[in-house]
Image: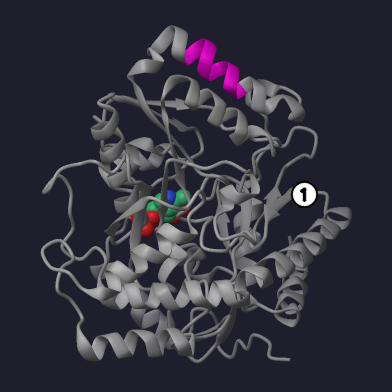
Amino acid sequence: MQRPNIKTELPGPKAKKWLKMDKRFISPSYTRSYPAVLERGEGVWVYDVDGNRFLDMTAGVAVLATGHVHPEIVEAALEQMKNLIHMSGTDFYYPAEIMLAEKLAEIVPGAQNRKVFFGNSGAEANEAAFKLARFHTKRPYVLSFIGSFHGRTYAAMSLSGSKSIHHKGFSPLVPGIIHIPYPDPYRTPFGVESDKVSDVVIDYIENIVFKKLVDPEEVSAIFFEPIQGEGGYIVPPDDFFKKLKNLAEKYGILLVDDEVQAGMGRTGKMFAIEHFGIIPDIVTVAKGIASGFPLGAMIAKSSIMDWSVGAHASTFGGNPVSCMAAIKTIELLEDGLIDNAAKMGDYLLNNLKKLMERYEFIGDVRGKGLMIGVDIVKDRKTKEHNTALRDRIVNDAFGMGLLLLGAGPSAIRWAPSLIVNKQEIDVALEIFEEALKKA
Ligand SMILES: Cc1ncc(COP(=O)(O)O)c(C=O)c1O
Protein backbone atom coordinates (compact mmCIF):
# COMPACT_ATOMS: atom_id res chain seq x y z
CA MET A 1 0.00 0.00 0.00
CA GLN A 2 1.33 3.40 -0.99
CA ARG A 3 2.05 5.76 1.90
CA PRO A 4 3.13 9.38 2.11
CA ASN A 5 6.84 9.82 1.60
CA ILE A 6 8.49 12.85 3.13
CA LYS A 7 12.11 12.94 2.04
CA THR A 8 13.11 16.49 2.94
CA GLU A 9 12.48 18.88 5.76
CA LEU A 10 9.22 20.77 5.16
CA PRO A 11 9.24 23.07 3.37
CA GLY A 12 12.03 21.52 1.30
CA PRO A 13 14.75 23.53 -0.46
CA LYS A 14 12.84 24.05 -3.72
CA ALA A 15 9.61 24.84 -1.88
CA LYS A 16 11.45 27.48 0.14
CA LYS A 17 12.42 29.32 -3.06
CA TRP A 18 8.81 29.32 -4.29
CA LEU A 19 7.54 30.50 -0.92
CA LYS A 20 9.93 33.43 -1.05
CA MET A 21 8.67 34.41 -4.50
CA ASP A 22 5.06 33.87 -3.46
CA LYS A 23 5.55 36.28 -0.58
CA ARG A 24 6.93 38.83 -2.99
CA PHE A 25 4.28 38.53 -5.73
CA ILE A 26 1.05 36.93 -4.46
CA SER A 27 -1.77 38.68 -2.63
CA PRO A 28 -1.26 38.42 1.14
CA SER A 29 -5.01 37.81 1.61
CA TYR A 30 -4.72 34.10 0.81
CA THR A 31 -5.28 31.71 3.70
CA ARG A 32 -2.60 29.05 3.45
CA SER A 33 -2.41 26.83 6.56
CA TYR A 34 0.98 25.26 5.87
CA PRO A 35 3.73 25.52 3.24
CA ALA A 36 2.68 22.85 0.72
CA VAL A 37 4.10 23.80 -2.70
CA LEU A 38 2.57 21.25 -5.04
CA GLU A 39 3.59 20.21 -8.49
CA ARG A 40 1.83 17.02 -9.52
CA GLY A 41 -1.17 14.98 -8.47
CA GLU A 42 -2.54 11.53 -9.13
CA GLY A 43 -5.75 10.20 -7.56
CA VAL A 44 -5.62 11.11 -3.87
CA TRP A 45 -1.84 11.58 -3.95
CA VAL A 46 -0.04 14.81 -4.56
CA TYR A 47 3.67 15.57 -4.89
CA ASP A 48 5.46 18.74 -3.92
CA VAL A 49 8.28 20.46 -5.80
CA ASP A 50 10.86 18.57 -3.72
CA GLY A 51 9.38 15.19 -4.60
CA ASN A 52 7.62 14.62 -1.26
CA ARG A 53 4.43 12.58 -1.56
CA PHE A 54 1.30 13.58 0.39
CA LEU A 55 -2.03 11.89 0.92
CA ASP A 56 -4.61 14.52 0.01
CA MET A 57 -7.74 14.50 2.16
CA THR A 58 -8.69 18.01 1.00
CA ALA A 59 -9.30 17.40 -2.74
CA GLY A 60 -8.07 20.95 -3.37
CA VAL A 61 -10.74 22.31 -0.98
CA ALA A 62 -13.54 19.91 -1.91
CA VAL A 63 -13.08 20.39 -5.64
CA LEU A 64 -11.46 17.30 -7.15
CA ALA A 65 -14.49 15.02 -7.08
CA THR A 66 -12.77 12.49 -9.35
CA GLY A 67 -9.29 12.91 -7.84
CA HIS A 68 -6.20 14.55 -9.26
CA VAL A 69 -5.91 14.35 -13.06
CA HIS A 70 -8.44 11.57 -13.59
CA PRO A 71 -7.51 10.13 -17.02
CA GLU A 72 -11.06 10.31 -18.36
CA ILE A 73 -11.38 13.96 -17.32
CA VAL A 74 -8.06 14.78 -18.95
CA GLU A 75 -9.17 13.03 -22.13
CA ALA A 76 -12.55 14.80 -22.23
CA ALA A 77 -10.89 18.17 -21.70
CA LEU A 78 -8.12 17.53 -24.24
CA GLU A 79 -10.61 16.40 -26.86
CA GLN A 80 -12.56 19.64 -26.40
CA MET A 81 -9.37 21.73 -26.38
CA LYS A 82 -8.42 20.40 -29.79
CA ASN A 83 -11.68 21.78 -31.21
CA LEU A 84 -12.82 24.86 -29.33
CA ILE A 85 -11.34 26.38 -26.18
CA HIS A 86 -13.48 29.47 -25.95
CA MET A 87 -16.21 31.27 -27.80
CA SER A 88 -18.25 32.90 -25.01
CA GLY A 89 -21.63 31.35 -24.37
CA THR A 90 -22.93 34.84 -23.75
CA ASP A 91 -22.78 35.80 -27.42
CA PHE A 92 -22.55 32.48 -29.26
CA TYR A 93 -23.86 28.95 -28.98
CA TYR A 94 -21.84 25.74 -28.60
CA PRO A 95 -22.95 22.19 -27.80
CA ALA A 96 -20.84 21.62 -24.64
CA GLU A 97 -22.66 24.30 -22.68
CA ILE A 98 -26.11 23.26 -23.85
CA MET A 99 -25.43 19.56 -23.20
CA LEU A 100 -24.26 20.30 -19.65
CA ALA A 101 -27.27 22.53 -18.97
CA GLU A 102 -29.57 19.73 -20.10
CA LYS A 103 -27.80 17.29 -17.77
CA LEU A 104 -27.90 19.65 -14.78
CA ALA A 105 -31.57 20.38 -15.41
CA GLU A 106 -32.18 16.63 -15.38
CA ILE A 107 -30.30 15.76 -12.17
CA VAL A 108 -31.17 18.73 -9.97
CA PRO A 109 -33.76 17.99 -7.24
CA GLY A 110 -37.28 18.33 -8.62
CA ALA A 111 -35.90 18.23 -12.18
CA GLN A 112 -37.97 19.30 -15.17
CA ASN A 113 -38.34 22.83 -16.36
CA ARG A 114 -35.04 24.11 -15.15
CA LYS A 115 -32.72 26.63 -16.79
CA VAL A 116 -29.03 27.15 -16.12
CA PHE A 117 -26.82 30.21 -15.88
CA PHE A 118 -23.08 29.53 -16.05
CA GLY A 119 -20.30 31.43 -14.32
CA ASN A 120 -16.78 30.48 -13.28
CA SER A 121 -17.02 30.02 -9.52
CA GLY A 122 -19.24 29.51 -6.51
CA ALA A 123 -19.33 33.22 -5.78
CA GLU A 124 -20.52 33.97 -9.32
CA ALA A 125 -23.21 31.31 -9.10
CA ASN A 126 -24.46 32.88 -5.87
CA GLU A 127 -24.25 36.42 -7.29
CA ALA A 128 -26.43 35.24 -10.15
CA ALA A 129 -28.92 33.64 -7.74
CA PHE A 130 -29.05 36.82 -5.66
CA LYS A 131 -29.71 38.99 -8.70
CA LEU A 132 -32.31 36.59 -10.10
CA ALA A 133 -34.16 36.31 -6.78
CA ARG A 134 -34.47 40.08 -6.51
CA PHE A 135 -35.31 40.47 -10.19
CA HIS A 136 -37.98 37.79 -10.25
CA THR A 137 -39.74 38.58 -6.99
CA LYS A 138 -39.22 42.37 -7.10
CA ARG A 139 -38.59 42.06 -3.35
CA PRO A 140 -35.48 43.70 -1.90
CA TYR A 141 -34.62 41.63 1.21
CA VAL A 142 -32.75 38.36 1.49
CA LEU A 143 -32.11 36.12 4.51
CA SER A 144 -29.00 34.06 5.00
CA PHE A 145 -27.47 32.18 7.88
CA ILE A 146 -24.87 33.04 10.46
CA GLY A 147 -21.92 30.72 9.84
CA SER A 148 -22.62 30.55 6.11
CA PHE A 149 -20.07 31.10 3.37
CA HIS A 150 -21.20 32.01 -0.12
CA GLY A 151 -18.08 33.56 -1.68
CA ARG A 152 -15.97 36.71 -1.88
CA THR A 153 -17.64 39.00 -4.41
CA TYR A 154 -19.81 41.76 -2.96
CA ALA A 155 -23.22 40.09 -2.76
CA ALA A 156 -21.75 36.67 -1.96
CA MET A 157 -19.54 38.23 0.73
CA SER A 158 -22.48 40.17 2.16
CA LEU A 159 -24.56 36.99 2.28
CA SER A 160 -21.78 35.21 4.17
CA GLY A 161 -21.60 35.19 7.92
CA SER A 162 -18.83 32.83 8.92
CA LYS A 163 -15.91 35.15 9.74
CA SER A 164 -15.89 38.89 10.42
CA ILE A 165 -12.48 39.18 8.70
CA HIS A 166 -14.33 38.49 5.42
CA HIS A 167 -16.25 41.75 5.94
CA LYS A 168 -13.68 43.89 7.76
CA GLY A 169 -12.76 47.00 5.80
CA PHE A 170 -15.22 46.31 2.99
CA SER A 171 -18.33 48.09 4.24
CA PRO A 172 -20.83 49.23 3.21
CA LEU A 173 -21.87 45.72 2.25
CA VAL A 174 -24.75 45.00 -0.10
CA PRO A 175 -27.85 46.23 1.75
CA GLY A 176 -30.99 44.22 2.42
CA ILE A 177 -29.42 41.05 3.85
CA ILE A 178 -30.54 39.81 7.26
CA HIS A 179 -28.59 37.05 9.01
CA ILE A 180 -30.38 34.42 11.04
CA PRO A 181 -29.01 31.66 13.30
CA TYR A 182 -28.21 28.30 11.69
CA PRO A 183 -29.77 25.21 13.24
CA ASP A 184 -26.50 23.82 14.62
CA PRO A 185 -27.39 20.82 16.77
CA TYR A 186 -23.98 20.87 18.53
CA ARG A 187 -23.55 24.50 19.55
CA THR A 188 -27.22 25.29 19.49
CA PRO A 189 -28.69 28.74 18.87
CA PHE A 190 -29.78 30.40 22.13
CA GLY A 191 -28.50 27.34 24.04
CA VAL A 192 -31.66 25.29 23.42
CA GLU A 193 -31.65 21.47 23.47
CA SER A 194 -30.46 19.85 20.22
CA ASP A 195 -33.90 18.56 19.34
CA LYS A 196 -35.31 22.09 19.50
CA VAL A 197 -32.96 23.84 17.07
CA SER A 198 -35.20 23.57 13.99
CA ASP A 199 -38.16 25.06 15.82
CA VAL A 200 -36.19 27.84 17.49
CA VAL A 201 -34.76 29.01 14.16
CA ILE A 202 -38.12 28.89 12.36
CA ASP A 203 -39.70 30.72 15.28
CA TYR A 204 -36.93 33.34 15.18
CA ILE A 205 -37.53 34.00 11.48
CA GLU A 206 -41.29 34.19 11.83
CA ASN A 207 -41.64 36.00 15.12
CA ILE A 208 -38.53 38.16 15.31
CA VAL A 209 -37.39 38.82 11.74
CA PHE A 210 -40.79 38.95 10.05
CA LYS A 211 -42.56 40.78 12.86
CA LYS A 212 -39.89 43.20 14.04
CA LEU A 213 -37.43 43.73 11.17
CA VAL A 214 -38.92 43.21 7.73
CA ASP A 215 -42.30 42.23 6.32
CA PRO A 216 -42.07 38.75 4.72
CA GLU A 217 -43.67 40.14 1.58
CA GLU A 218 -40.50 42.13 1.05
CA VAL A 219 -38.25 39.06 1.32
CA SER A 220 -37.21 37.53 -1.99
CA ALA A 221 -35.11 34.56 -0.91
CA ILE A 222 -33.50 32.57 1.85
CA PHE A 223 -29.97 31.43 1.00
CA PHE A 224 -28.66 28.36 2.80
CA GLU A 225 -25.99 25.68 2.71
CA PRO A 226 -27.57 22.24 3.26
CA ILE A 227 -24.47 21.43 5.31
CA GLN A 228 -22.38 24.42 6.32
CA GLY A 229 -18.87 24.17 4.90
CA GLU A 230 -16.49 26.98 5.75
CA GLY A 231 -18.54 27.61 8.91
CA GLY A 232 -17.31 24.31 10.37
CA TYR A 233 -18.97 21.35 8.61
CA ILE A 234 -22.27 21.64 10.43
CA VAL A 235 -25.15 19.27 9.67
CA PRO A 236 -28.63 20.56 10.50
CA PRO A 237 -31.35 18.26 11.89
CA ASP A 238 -33.28 16.09 9.41
CA ASP A 239 -36.51 18.04 9.82
CA PHE A 240 -35.12 21.55 9.39
CA PHE A 241 -35.40 22.15 5.65
CA LYS A 242 -38.97 20.80 5.48
CA LYS A 243 -39.92 23.37 8.10
CA LEU A 244 -38.03 26.09 6.28
CA LYS A 245 -39.75 25.16 3.03
CA ASN A 246 -43.19 25.38 4.68
CA LEU A 247 -42.33 28.81 5.98
CA ALA A 248 -40.97 30.00 2.63
CA GLU A 249 -44.02 28.74 0.74
CA LYS A 250 -46.34 30.48 3.17
CA TYR A 251 -44.83 33.83 2.22
CA GLY A 252 -43.83 33.22 -1.40
CA ILE A 253 -40.10 33.33 -0.60
CA LEU A 254 -37.60 31.48 -2.81
CA LEU A 255 -35.21 28.93 -1.32
CA VAL A 256 -31.69 29.16 -2.70
CA ASP A 257 -29.66 26.04 -1.97
CA ASP A 258 -25.90 26.68 -2.11
CA GLU A 259 -24.45 23.27 -3.02
CA VAL A 260 -21.06 24.69 -3.93
CA GLN A 261 -19.21 22.64 -1.31
CA ALA A 262 -21.73 19.93 -0.37
CA GLY A 263 -23.00 19.13 -3.86
CA MET A 264 -21.81 16.95 -6.73
CA GLY A 265 -21.92 13.66 -4.90
CA ARG A 266 -19.76 14.60 -1.94
CA THR A 267 -22.33 13.70 0.73
CA GLY A 268 -23.30 10.40 -0.86
CA LYS A 269 -26.13 11.91 -2.88
CA MET A 270 -25.76 14.07 -5.98
CA PHE A 271 -27.06 17.10 -4.03
CA ALA A 272 -26.86 17.32 -0.25
CA ILE A 273 -30.40 18.68 -0.01
CA GLU A 274 -31.63 15.24 -1.16
CA HIS A 275 -30.88 14.03 2.38
CA PHE A 276 -33.52 16.43 3.63
CA GLY A 277 -36.32 15.76 1.12
CA ILE A 278 -37.16 19.21 -0.21
CA ILE A 279 -36.98 20.83 -3.61
CA PRO A 280 -35.27 24.22 -3.66
CA ASP A 281 -36.23 26.91 -6.18
CA ILE A 282 -32.64 27.73 -7.10
CA VAL A 283 -29.52 25.57 -6.70
CA THR A 284 -25.96 26.82 -7.03
CA VAL A 285 -22.97 24.57 -7.74
CA ALA A 286 -19.26 24.99 -8.45
CA LYS A 287 -16.19 23.34 -6.83
CA GLY A 288 -16.72 19.59 -7.55
CA ILE A 289 -18.71 20.07 -10.74
CA ALA A 290 -15.80 19.93 -13.22
CA SER A 291 -13.08 18.02 -11.34
CA GLY A 292 -10.86 21.12 -11.03
CA PHE A 293 -11.77 23.14 -14.10
CA PRO A 294 -13.32 26.49 -13.17
CA LEU A 295 -17.08 26.43 -13.51
CA GLY A 296 -20.09 27.61 -11.55
CA ALA A 297 -23.75 27.11 -12.30
CA MET A 298 -27.00 28.54 -11.06
CA ILE A 299 -29.93 26.27 -11.82
CA ALA A 300 -33.41 27.72 -11.38
CA LYS A 301 -36.98 26.78 -12.12
CA SER A 302 -37.69 28.03 -15.64
CA SER A 303 -40.64 30.04 -14.36
CA ILE A 304 -38.25 31.94 -12.08
CA MET A 305 -35.52 32.53 -14.65
CA ASP A 306 -37.54 35.22 -16.37
CA TRP A 307 -34.92 37.95 -16.67
CA SER A 308 -34.52 39.74 -19.95
CA VAL A 309 -31.82 39.60 -22.63
CA GLY A 310 -28.70 41.34 -21.34
CA ALA A 311 -29.76 41.27 -17.67
CA HIS A 312 -26.88 39.00 -16.68
CA ALA A 313 -24.00 37.27 -18.49
CA SER A 314 -20.36 36.23 -18.27
CA THR A 315 -17.59 36.10 -20.89
CA PHE A 316 -15.93 32.95 -19.57
CA GLY A 317 -18.92 31.34 -17.83
CA GLY A 318 -19.74 27.93 -19.30
CA ASN A 319 -16.33 27.55 -20.93
CA PRO A 320 -16.51 24.56 -23.30
CA VAL A 321 -13.50 22.76 -21.79
CA SER A 322 -14.93 23.13 -18.28
CA CYS A 323 -18.34 21.98 -19.53
CA MET A 324 -16.93 18.81 -21.11
CA ALA A 325 -14.99 18.08 -17.91
CA ALA A 326 -18.24 18.56 -15.98
CA ILE A 327 -20.20 16.21 -18.23
CA LYS A 328 -17.56 13.55 -17.71
CA THR A 329 -17.45 14.27 -13.97
CA ILE A 330 -21.21 13.74 -13.66
CA GLU A 331 -20.95 10.52 -15.66
CA LEU A 332 -18.28 9.20 -13.28
CA LEU A 333 -20.29 10.30 -10.26
CA GLU A 334 -23.37 8.47 -11.50
CA ASP A 335 -21.33 5.40 -12.45
CA GLY A 336 -20.18 4.69 -8.91
CA LEU A 337 -18.43 7.59 -7.24
CA ILE A 338 -21.52 8.81 -5.38
CA ASP A 339 -22.02 5.30 -3.98
CA ASN A 340 -18.36 5.19 -3.08
CA ALA A 341 -18.66 8.54 -1.27
CA ALA A 342 -21.57 7.14 0.78
CA LYS A 343 -19.73 3.91 1.65
CA MET A 344 -16.30 5.40 2.31
CA GLY A 345 -17.95 8.28 4.16
CA ASP A 346 -19.65 5.88 6.60
CA TYR A 347 -16.39 4.03 7.12
CA LEU A 348 -14.44 7.22 7.75
CA LEU A 349 -17.12 8.73 10.00
CA ASN A 350 -17.36 5.60 12.17
CA ASN A 351 -13.60 5.40 12.57
CA LEU A 352 -13.27 9.09 13.40
CA LYS A 353 -16.06 8.68 15.97
CA LYS A 354 -14.07 5.87 17.60
CA LEU A 355 -11.21 8.32 18.15
CA MET A 356 -13.52 10.29 20.43
CA GLU A 357 -13.19 7.48 22.98
CA ARG A 358 -9.44 8.07 23.19
CA TYR A 359 -9.10 11.82 22.72
CA GLU A 360 -11.03 14.02 25.10
CA PHE A 361 -10.34 17.11 23.00
CA ILE A 362 -12.47 15.81 20.14
CA GLY A 363 -15.83 17.36 20.98
CA ASP A 364 -17.83 16.21 17.98
CA VAL A 365 -17.52 14.21 14.77
CA ARG A 366 -20.22 14.92 12.21
CA GLY A 367 -20.94 14.82 8.52
CA LYS A 368 -22.49 13.01 5.62
CA GLY A 369 -20.63 11.03 2.99
CA LEU A 370 -17.16 12.47 2.45
CA MET A 371 -17.93 15.79 4.09
CA ILE A 372 -16.86 15.21 7.68
CA GLY A 373 -15.82 17.59 10.43
CA VAL A 374 -13.87 16.73 13.59
CA ASP A 375 -14.42 19.48 16.15
CA ILE A 376 -11.54 20.19 18.55
CA VAL A 377 -12.62 21.67 21.89
CA LYS A 378 -11.04 22.92 25.09
CA ASP A 379 -13.67 21.17 27.13
CA ARG A 380 -16.39 18.74 26.06
CA LYS A 381 -18.93 20.31 28.40
CA THR A 382 -18.43 23.96 27.41
CA LYS A 383 -17.63 23.03 23.77
CA GLU A 384 -15.25 25.99 23.68
CA HIS A 385 -13.41 26.08 20.34
CA ASN A 386 -9.76 25.04 20.52
CA THR A 387 -8.45 26.81 17.45
CA ALA A 388 -4.78 26.62 18.44
CA LEU A 389 -4.87 22.87 19.00
CA ARG A 390 -6.84 22.30 15.80
CA ASP A 391 -4.24 24.25 13.83
CA ARG A 392 -1.42 22.28 15.45
CA ILE A 393 -3.02 18.94 14.55
CA VAL A 394 -3.50 20.03 10.91
CA ASN A 395 0.09 21.24 10.80
CA ASP A 396 1.51 18.07 12.39
CA ALA A 397 -0.48 15.95 9.93
CA PHE A 398 1.10 17.94 7.09
CA GLY A 399 4.54 17.21 8.56
CA MET A 400 3.71 13.49 8.33
CA GLY A 401 2.43 13.73 4.75
CA LEU A 402 -1.32 14.01 5.34
CA LEU A 403 -3.10 17.03 3.88
CA LEU A 404 -6.09 18.23 5.89
CA LEU A 405 -7.64 21.66 6.32
CA GLY A 406 -9.54 23.46 9.03
CA ALA A 407 -13.12 24.68 8.69
CA GLY A 408 -14.68 27.25 10.99
CA PRO A 409 -13.06 28.09 14.32
CA SER A 410 -12.24 24.55 15.46
CA ALA A 411 -13.21 21.83 12.97
CA ILE A 412 -10.82 19.72 10.94
CA ARG A 413 -12.42 19.01 7.61
CA TRP A 414 -12.20 15.71 5.80
CA ALA A 415 -13.15 16.24 2.16
CA PRO A 416 -11.19 13.75 0.06
CA SER A 417 -11.87 12.96 -3.56
CA LEU A 418 -14.79 10.64 -4.10
CA ILE A 419 -12.47 7.98 -5.56
CA VAL A 420 -10.80 7.38 -2.18
CA ASN A 421 -10.62 3.73 -1.08
CA LYS A 422 -10.56 1.95 2.28
CA GLN A 423 -6.79 1.42 2.30
CA GLU A 424 -6.14 5.08 1.66
CA ILE A 425 -8.55 6.03 4.43
CA ASP A 426 -6.80 3.59 6.79
CA VAL A 427 -3.43 5.21 6.06
CA ALA A 428 -4.94 8.66 6.61
CA LEU A 429 -6.54 7.59 9.89
CA GLU A 430 -3.28 6.10 11.13
CA ILE A 431 -1.38 9.33 10.46
CA PHE A 432 -4.22 11.42 11.87
CA GLU A 433 -4.06 9.46 15.11
CA GLU A 434 -0.30 10.07 15.27
CA ALA A 435 -1.03 13.79 15.01
CA LEU A 436 -3.70 13.50 17.72
CA LYS A 437 -1.26 11.68 20.01
CA LYS A 438 1.31 14.41 19.52
CA ALA A 439 -1.34 17.02 20.33
C1 LIG B 1 -20.77 26.84 0.17
C2 LIG B 1 -19.87 27.71 -0.64
N1 LIG B 1 -20.40 28.65 -1.44
C3 LIG B 1 -19.64 29.44 -2.20
C4 LIG B 1 -18.27 29.35 -2.16
C5 LIG B 1 -17.45 30.26 -3.03
O1 LIG B 1 -16.93 29.55 -4.08
P1 LIG B 1 -15.73 30.17 -4.97
O2 LIG B 1 -14.54 30.21 -4.08
O3 LIG B 1 -15.62 29.22 -6.11
O4 LIG B 1 -16.18 31.51 -5.39
C6 LIG B 1 -17.66 28.40 -1.35
C7 LIG B 1 -16.20 28.29 -1.30
O5 LIG B 1 -15.63 27.75 -0.40
C8 LIG B 1 -18.49 27.55 -0.56
O6 LIG B 1 -17.95 26.64 0.24
Q: Secondary structure at mark 1?
A: loop
Vertical position of residue 183 compared to residue 408: above or below: above
Does the image show residue 40? no
Number of numbered discs on residues? 1
Query: At label 1, which amino acid type do we have?
Result: Phe
Q: Taken as a whole, is the magenta stretch helix, strand or loop? A: helix
- For the point 37% across and 42% down, the residue is 166
> Which of the two residues, 158 or 29, is positioned nearer the viewer here?
158
Q: Is residue 406 left or right of residue 150?
A: right
- Residue beneath label 1, please? 361
Which region of the structure is painted magenta? 201-209
Provide residue 204's location: percent of width, then percent of height.
56, 17
> Which of the two residues, 13 or 308, is positioned nearer the viewer here?
308
Provide residue 328's location: percent of width, then percent of height.
44, 78
Provide residue 308's location: percent of width, then percent of height.
15, 43
- For the point 63% across and 51% down, the residue is 411
- For the point 75% across and 82% down, the residue is 423
Determine the residue located farthest toward the right in the rendered image.
357
Q: Is residue 311 left or right of residue 359?
A: left
Which quadrant would the N terminus be assigned to in this image?
bottom right
Vertical position of residue 399 compared to residue 231: above or below: below
- For the point 69% across and 23% down, the residue is 191
Report whether the residue tagged 1 is closer than 8 Å to ligand 1.
no
Provide residue 418's location: percent of width, then percent of height.
60, 72
> Which of the two residues, 113 or 122, is positioned nearer the viewer here?
113
Does the image show residue 52? yes
Instruction: Estimate how packed mark 1 is, as few (under 14), some (14 to 19) or many (20 or more) residues with alpha carbons within 10 Å.
Output: many
Q: Is residue 14 magenta?
A: no
Vertical position of residue 414 compared to residue 35: above or below: above
Which quadrant would the C terminus be assigned to in this image?
bottom right
Q: Is residue 368 left or right of residue 333?
A: right
